[in-house]
Image: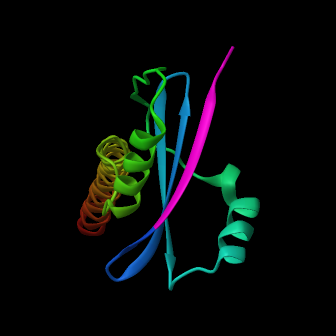
Amino acid sequence: MDRANGRLTVCFEDPFWIGIFERVINDKLYVAKVTFGSEPKDYEVYDFVKQNYFKLRYSPGVDVIEEARSISPKRRQREAKRQVAQKGIGTKSQIALQLQREEFKTERKLRSKEEKLEEAAKKFELRQQKKKERHRGRA
């Protein structure tokens, strides 16, 4: 059976407030990053999640190994305190976001390369057409 787990972290990354959506499906971590701008209120975040959750573009999956062991309550409390005090994004989330950035970068490079080739072909055709017109004019 498939297991799914999701989490939203809202934090301040100078100069904007951002939201990091993390979801774990079948031991793979997927991450999406959203910029809120000014500090969002709870109801604004809730409305955003309701309206745009299924439109989010998640990064490629990163393997996650979760250990299913019982943890003492004191250890859980210490880990919760560490997570609250932690600044920035977890390392696995950073890796997933970096993969997403690289994916967008390669898509953008391919698109721009195709556009440059099309522009070069148009220029070549225009030069050939002008060449034929000049040739016809003298004959």
Q: Is residue 3 magenta?
A: yes
Q: Quadrant of residue 122?
A: bottom left
Quadrant location, the N terminus: top right
Q: Which residues are magenta?
A: 1-10
Q: In x, y percent, where is residue 14?
A: 31, 79
Q: In x, y percent, where is residue 134?
A: 25, 67
**Residue at point 39% right, 40% down?**
75
Nearest the camera: 107 or 102? 102
Q: In x, y percent, where is residue 110?
A: 33, 45
Q: Is residue 39 above or below residue 124?
A: below
Q: Residue furthest top?
A: 1
Nearest the camera: 33 or 110? 33
Could you tell me what secondary structure mostly forms the magenta stretch? strand
Q: How many numbered marks have been drawn onto this rendered protein structure?
A: 0
Q: In x, y percent, where is residue 34?
A: 50, 64
Q: Is residue 84 magenta?
A: no
Residue 76 located left or right of residue 115: right
Q: Is residue 132 above or below residue 48?
A: above
**Residue at point 46% right, 20% down?**
69
Q: How is the structure coloured here?
A: rainbow
**Residue at point 32% right, 65% down?**
133
Nearest the camera: 130 or 66? 66
Quadrant location, the C terminus: bottom left
